[in-house]
Each structure stands twice: as structure tokens, then as C-alpha cells.
Amino acid sequence: MALDDVVNAVDRVEGLLADGETGPVQDSLSWQRDDADIQLGKACAMLGTCRQLRDGTNNNVSIVELSFNAIERSFQFYLVEMTTAESSDYHEHSAVFRDIENRGVFSDENIADRIDRFRAEHRSRMYYDIDRPGRDLALGMHDLAEEVHSYIVTFADAQSRCSCDRTHD
């Protein structure tokens, strides 16, 4: 690949974004119209990808990263759905976790704070391959993301809007 190929690829992406011609939206995200449902749909899509990646090998970093993202999108869904917040209010990851913790969504179990502390300490180290997550941690993170998502969706009484296929178990 030459420099011209990179320049052409950047030009193409910039052109697609400038023209608003990004192509068809993936099916699982095509019905969402409001901010909360967009976040819910993103969480569901990321969890679906994790389910597919679990069947492969050597996908640990991807599973961990998508699991963190799915947890954050699930929390953001709840905050936008149940408060006056908007997704654009959350430019920092820690704000989502702090607001969930402050709302007592997980009672007094400090779940959001515990996940945020783990995220703050280990996520970038895994993402940048300083720490290399093993298969057990990757699967554990996915299980955690599934449980958090399911809990949040139930807590918000939004089961009918969740596009996860819960028959994957």
C-alpha cells in the first residue's frame, strides 16, 4: 500500500461523511429515532458482535473492548431515557459511570463505581496491548456486559425495545 492509497481512502471517507451518503444503516440500528434508543441499539449491536467473537479464537482484546463499550452504552441509554441528559452530555467515560452510581441504579452495591475503577485502571492497558487479556477475562467481561445490559433494560422497563436475541444462552 502506497501513500496515495492512504490519501485516497481518507478522501473517500471524508466524502461519504460530507455528502451524508454513508450507505444503509445496519438492520439492528435502523429503527431507532431518539437518543436513548440509539444508545440501546448500539449496546445490543456490540453484545451481538461479542457473541459472534466468542466462537472464534484470539479475539480477547476485541471482546473486552466491545464489552466495555456495551456497558457504557447501556448506562448511557438509561441516563438519556430516565433523566433530562442527552448523549452529548457524556464526553468523558467516567461521567456516565458516576451518574449511574449517583442514581442508585444498582442500589448500594457500588457496581458502576467498581466497573469504572476497573475500566480506568485496565482498559487502556489492554487496548494498547500493555496488558494482554486472557480468554477467561474476555469471556468474563462479556458475561458482565450481558448481565449489566439485561439488568439496565429490565430496570428501565425497556425489554420490548431491546434488540438482543436472548436465546443465545
Image (cartoon, rainbow, N blue to C red):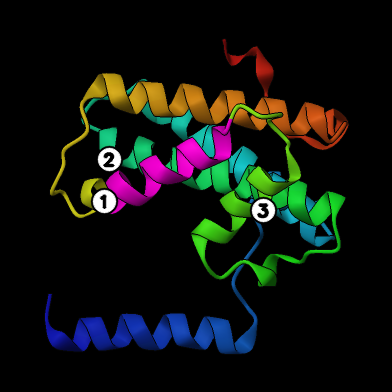
Question: Which residue is under mark 1?
Answer: 127
Give the residue drawn at x 20%, y 55%: 128
Res 50 visible? yes
Counting residues from the start of the chain, the first of labels 3 and 2 encountered is 2
Viewer-nearest residue: 55 or 119: 119
Residue 134 colored magenta? no
Of marks 1 and 3, the one in the foreground:
3
Q: CA distance from mark 3 to mark 2?
A: 27 Å
Res 27 visible? no
Amino acid type indicated by mark 3:
Asp
Prevailing secondary structure of the magenta residues: helix
Question: Which residue is under mark 2?
Answer: 61
Secondary structure at numbered mark 1: helix
Label 1 close to label 2 by CB (< 8 Å): yes
Q: Is residue 166 left or right of residue 134?
A: right
Find the residue positioned furthest to the front.
108
Question: Which residue is under mark 3?
Answer: 99
Which stretch did the figure color magenta? 110-124
Viewer-nearest residue: 56 or 40: 40
Amino acid type indicated by mark 2:
Val
Counting residues from the start of the chain, the first of labels 1 and 3 encountered is 3
Residue 122 colored magenta? yes
Q: Which mark is residue 58?
A: none
Amino acid type indicated by mark 1:
Tyr
Q: CA distance from mark 1 to mark 3?
A: 24 Å
